[in-house]
Image (cartoon, coloured by chain):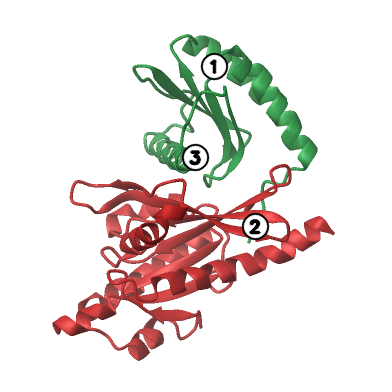
Chain colours: A red, B green
Amino acid sequence: MALINPKTKEVQVKLVYYGPGRGGKTTNLEYIYNKYQDRMTTKLTTVKTYGDRTLFFDFLPLDIGMIGGYNIKMQLYTVPGQVKYQATRRLVLRGVDGVVFVADSMALREKMNVLSLKDLQENLATFDKNIFKIPLVIQYNKRDLAKEKIPLLPTEKLENILNKQLKAPSFAASALTGENVVETMKKAISLTVSSLQQKLAIKQG
Amino acid sequence: MDYTVELDEKQFETMENILAKELIEVGVQSLLLIDLAGNILISLNDGKARHDVYSLAALAAGNFGAVSEIAKIIGETDFSLLFHKGEKESIHFSRVADDLLLITVFGKEVSLGFLRLKVAEAIKKITALL
């Protein structure tokens, strides 16, 4: 849940990158950090295994400026995607305000995408949050692999499998090259903050 | 979007004063009052401590959450003490009401027993405001 501090005039908003293991959630945050680190005062925090798999979460705080007289601080998190870290994903989702679902475009990962999305829906429900109502953006990652002749699912098929009912904004992307990484983040921030503005207006009124 | 911890400016100020008096003034180097999602409500220090408080808050919330789950697995409701001892600085975690955590970083000059006493007093006063 967004934390509004009327004394410091600051709002902290939590955005979680979710998705199957090895899908590119951490790579998204690494790209964002590398791109903007000159403007940041804090670094990217990662808790990972020796094999470079996310163990607990990655964390990147971002100041995005003033809205409605409040300084908005986005807290970007990723979750560990491997199936065995179910309990950890639930922990990290606590207090979430917006989600970026990073889907793996590789054809052999089709089933894992579906399972991960279902997992997200169930974990959100444990906090009385509805996947159809929470600010959500879907990213179809790894589109760069097409150049290496690795079989990918067409984005139309991914839309049909993952987004037919949700109808969330979606982006074809490559976290490795940076294509649409920032655009995904900006859309997620925009959706998340727009619901905040109403609350801030009520507080100021 | 939910806003389950809502405090007004006066409450923030009163809580800050309590924490400064009960903890910073007795030698605690820095403290954070955070929610279980890792958001910072209050951050105070002795003027010398320089920690990355946002990362500390996120990790602390995750740590506390993980330890709470461990407690449930072994049949406990919660652990009464969560504390990590360092060579020069140590860190103590304490739950405040249902939704908040008080994290204190302190050096060798403050004993754990004394800190736990002062933390308990501070928490009692803060809880009365919530």
- Judged from the image, the secondary structure of the residue bearing numbered disc 1 is helix
Q: Looking at the image, which residue sits at the far left?
A: A149
Q: In which quarter of the image is the C terminus of chain B?
A: top right
Amino acid type, residue under disc 2 in the picture: Asp
Vertical relation: A159 (above or below) A111: below
Q: Mark 1 points at which residue?
A: B116
Going from N to C along the chain, the mark reached first, 1 or 3, is: 3
- Judged from the image, the secondary structure of the residue bearing numbered disc 3 is helix
Q: Do the residues labelled 1 and 3 touch (CB within 8 Å)?
A: no
- Counting from the top left corner in percent of width and height, residue B8 is at 77, 43
Using residue B82 as the reference point, say whether residue A64 is left or right of it: right
Q: Mark 2 points at which residue?
A: B2
Vertical relation: A45 (above or below) A113: above
Vertical relation: A100 (above or below) B118: below
The disc placed on residue B57 is: 3
Q: Check disc 1: other Cα within 10 Å, few if <14, some if 14-19, many if 20+.
A: some
- Counting from the top left corner in percent of width and height, residue B30 is at 53, 26
**Count of numbered labels shown in the rendering:** 3
Going from N to C along the chain, the mark reached first, 1 or 2, is: 2
Amino acid type, residue under disc 1 in the picture: Arg
Using residue A195 as the reference point, say whether residue A157 is left or right of it: left
Using residue A35 as the reference point, say whether residue B7 is left or right of it: right
Instruction: Residue B34: tell me if it is visible.
Output: yes
Quarter of the rendering containing residue B98: top right
Q: Which chain carries label 1?
A: B
Amino acid type, residue under disc 3 in the picture: Ala
Q: Distance between the residues labelled 3 and 2?
A: 20 Å
- Judged from the image, the secondary structure of the residue bearing numbered disc 2 is loop
Residue at 54% in and 18% down: B28
